């Protein structure tokens, strides 16, 4: 085989090989991009679900924070026990879309709400745990928003 014949075959097969390589790389990158798009679509949906639950719970806490029973309450607001149940259901269905920090924050909040549900009326005489719960709700919302990587 002469050198000219080698270059002739190289000229024929070189575009074919480079086309195959470009095709494989493009296919891998487009699949990765599609997976990331689907993940973010579900993360945003999960964020909206958690956000709605947590903001409604925050509205539920408002009258007790300010010791004003006449503050308007959200019609969607639930009590602590019902919020815990709704939050747990949302966590079970959306935990796959959360990172470790968000998962820990939501689980810690559910633990605190569960502990909060065990308080009796006379336990509130010296402390106002409603404000602490509202601060925790805001922390979790901020962590969930940070998880979206939109900032």
Image (spheres, helix red, strand yellow):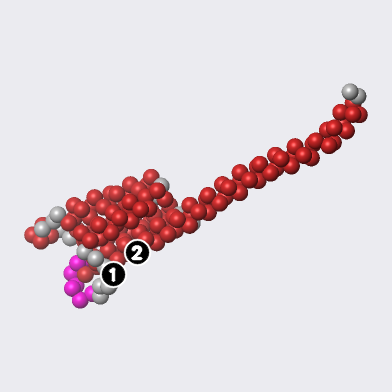
Q: Which mark is residue 76?
A: 1
Label 2: how many Cα within 10 Å (few below 14, some 14–19, many 20+): some
Locate residue 120: give its quadrant. bottom left
Name the main secondary structure of what is drawn in magenta. Answer: loop
Q: Residue at x 30, y 66 (%)?
A: 56
Whether residue 34 sits left or right of residue 92 in the image: it is: right
Contact, mark 2 vs mark 1 (Cβ under 8 Å): yes
Tell me the quarter of the image containing the N terminus.
top right
Q: Residue at x 48, y 57 (%)?
A: 41
Whether residue 31 sits left or right of residue 60 in the image: it is: right
- Marks 2 and 1 sit apart, C-alpha to C-alpha, by 9 Å
Q: Nearer the viewer, residue 67 or 32?
A: 32
Mark 2 and mark 1 lie on one chain; the one further toward the N terminus is: 2
Looking at the rendered structure, the secondary structure element under dot 2 is: helix
Visible residue check, residue 28? yes
Q: Which residues are magenta?
A: 64-71
Label 1: how many Cα within 10 Å (few below 14, some 14–19, many 20+): few
Locate residue 51: give its quadrant. bottom left
Visible residue check, residue 139? no
Q: Residue at x 35, y 59 (%)?
A: 50
Tell me the residue that label 2 is attached to.
Answer: 52
Residue 24 horizontal/vertical position (percent): 66, 41
Looking at the rendered structure, the secondary structure element under dot 1 is: loop
Residue 36 horizontal/vertical position (percent): 52, 50
Q: Which mark is residue 30?
A: none
- Residue 59 vertical position relative to residue 22 in the rendered view, above or below: below
Q: Nearer the viewer, residue 116 or 35?
A: 35
**65 in magenta:** yes
Whether residue 1 sits left or right of residue 114 in the image: it is: right
Residue 89 horizontal/vertical position (percent): 30, 55
Residue 79 horizontal/vertical position (percent): 21, 64
């Amino acid at each position: 085989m002469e050198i000219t014949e080698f270059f002739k075959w190289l000229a024929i097969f070189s575009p074919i090989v480079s086309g195959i390589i470009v095709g494989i790389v493009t296919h891998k990158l487009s699949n990765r991009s599609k997976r990331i798009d689907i993940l973010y679509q579900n993360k945003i949906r999960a964020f909206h679900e958690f956000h709605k639950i947590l903001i409604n719970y925050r509205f539920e806490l408002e009258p007790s924070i300010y010791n004003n029973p006449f503050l308007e309450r959200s019609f969607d607001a639930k009590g602590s026990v019902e919020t815990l149940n709704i939050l747990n259901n949302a966590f079970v269905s959306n935990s796959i879309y959360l990172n470790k920090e968000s998962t820990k924050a939501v689980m810690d909040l559910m633990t605190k709400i569960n502990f909060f549900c065990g308080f009796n009326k006379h336990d509130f005489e010296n402390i106002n745990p409603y404000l602490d719960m509202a601060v925790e709700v805001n922390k979790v919302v901020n962590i969930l928003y940070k998880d979206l990587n939109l900032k």
